[in-house]
Amino acid sequence: MDFAQRTIDIARQNVAEGGRPFATVIVKDGEILAESPNLVAQTSDPTAHAEILAIREACTKLGTEHLTGATIYVLAHPCPMCLGSLYYCSPDEVVFLTTRDAYEPHYVDDRKYFELDTFYGEFAKDHTERRLPMRHDARADAIAVYRFWQERNGGERRVADAPTSPF
Ligand SMILES: [Zn+2]
């Protein structure tokens, strides 16, 4: 099966139904584990990007937060939110079928605190420099929650069974 073509077909169908031009297909062991179009227009949920929905479905199905061994096809190079979610689920590979530069003549989704050109750069800035207003209200009781978690985790501070880098 041509999984890239499947990704294009899902996105095209979504546009035909009034949705936005994005889709994700997650493949493991040669089969589709989960797939989704972007459902932001249909649900008013700004986090309902195709990657987020497909990752959620795949992980729920497998009962794990790790998609090691999976290949994830996305119609477009992922936004920072989805890029973060892709880092979290540790797939073997992400395949993107278009770039922002290629689709920009046809689709733009700028917001109050970013344009697609500036979005990735915002994340690298110190919080005081970001366009999104952020305020650090430091509380010792907040740190205590982490100490409590570590105690409940047998004194270990790492989450069990997460695939970490061998380097
Ligand atoms: Zn996204």
Image (cartoon, rainbow, N blue to C red):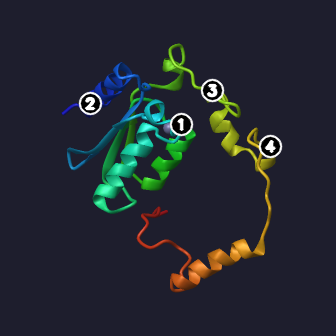
Which residue is labeled 3 in the image?
A: 110
Q: Secondary structure at mark 3?
A: loop
Three-letter code for the amino acid on which mark 2 is drawn: Arg
**Numbered circles on residues, count:** 4
Image: 94 above or below 14: below
Q: Position of residue 63 (x, y in %)?
A: 32, 62
Residue at mark 1 to residue at mark 2: CA–CA distance:
21 Å
Q: Position of residue 96 (x, y in %)?
A: 41, 32
Which residue is labeled 1 in the image?
A: 79
Residue 26 in view in this figure: no
- Disc 1 residue lies near ligand 1 with CB under 8 A: yes
Answer with the quarter of the image where residue 101 lies.
top right
Question: At x 42% / y 35%, what residue is drawn?
Answer: 39
Three-letter code for the amino acid on which mark 3 is drawn: Asp
**Which is nearer the N-term, disc 2 or disc 3?**
2
Residue 113 in view in this figure: yes
Q: Pointer 3: residues within 10 angstroms few (<14), some, or many (20+)?
A: few
Which residue is labeled 4 in the image?
A: 129
Residue at mark 3 to residue at mark 4: CA–CA distance:
19 Å
**Which of the two discs, 2 and 3, sits closer to the camera?**
3
**Which is nearer the N-term, disc 1 or disc 3?**
1
Which residue is labeled 2 in the image?
A: 6
Q: Pointer 2: residues within 10 angstroms few (<14), some, or many (20+)?
A: some
**Which is nearer the N-term, disc 1 or disc 4?**
1
Answer with the quarter of the image where residue 95 lies.
top left
Residue at mark 1 to residue at mark 3: CA–CA distance:
12 Å
Three-letter code for the amino acid on which mark 1 is drawn: Cys
Answer with the quarter of the image where residue 136 lies.
bottom right
Q: Secondary structure at mark 4?
A: helix
